[in-house]
Image: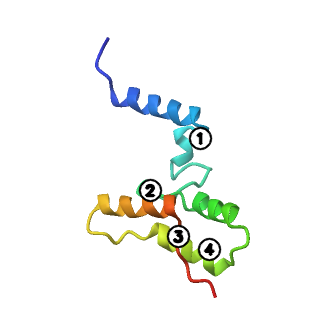
Amino acid sequence: MGAVTEYDLEHATLEWFAELGYEVLPSDHLDPESVYNERASQSDAVLVGRLDAAIRRLNPDLAEDTIEQAKKQVLRRDQATLALDNEVLHRLMTEGIELEVV
């Protein structure tokens, strides 16, 4: 058996995600030049349209300004390191977001 390549690892990971019930799309869906409009540039790590749709699906009674507050919290990256930014994002996604609703 040959060495495991990045390609092998990527495809094994995508298969695992599919087995867990995640929707695995062809990579051209993430190409900024594609007709899918998933992201504006290669540097966009978060698919904002999908984030917006998920917030609305999970919280159908939220007002528009509250949805925008939630998106801003998820998209904010102001920690000293990428690792800390990822930790904060993980916490927001697993523990929820606290928002002031008036």
The N terminus, quarter of image: top left
Residue 71 lies in quadrant: bottom right
Specify few, some or many for label 2: CA neighbours under 10 Å numbering under 14, 14-19, or 20 or more: few
Which of the two labelled residues, at mark 1 and mark 4, occupies the earlier sequence position?
A: 1
Looking at the image, which residue is at 43% across and 58% down?
Answer: 90
- 2 or 3: tag closer to the N-terminus: 2
Q: What residue do we see at 57% from left, 36% from top?
A: 20
Spatial CA span between label 2 and label 4: 19 Å
Residue found farthest to the right: 61
Q: Amino acid at mark 1?
A: Tyr
**Residue tagged 4:** 67
Say above or below: 60 vs 28: below
Q: Nearer the viewer, residue 11 or 27?
A: 11
Determine the residue located farthest toward the left in the rendered image.
Answer: 80
- Mark 2 and mark 1 lie on one chain; the one further toward the N terminus is 1
Q: Which amino acid type is shown beneath numbered disc 4?
A: Ile
- Tell me residue 19's x, y (percent): 57, 32
> Disc 3 on helix, strand or loop?
loop
- Which residue is denoted by mark 2 in the rendering? 45
Residue 31 image position (x, y, % from top left): 51, 48
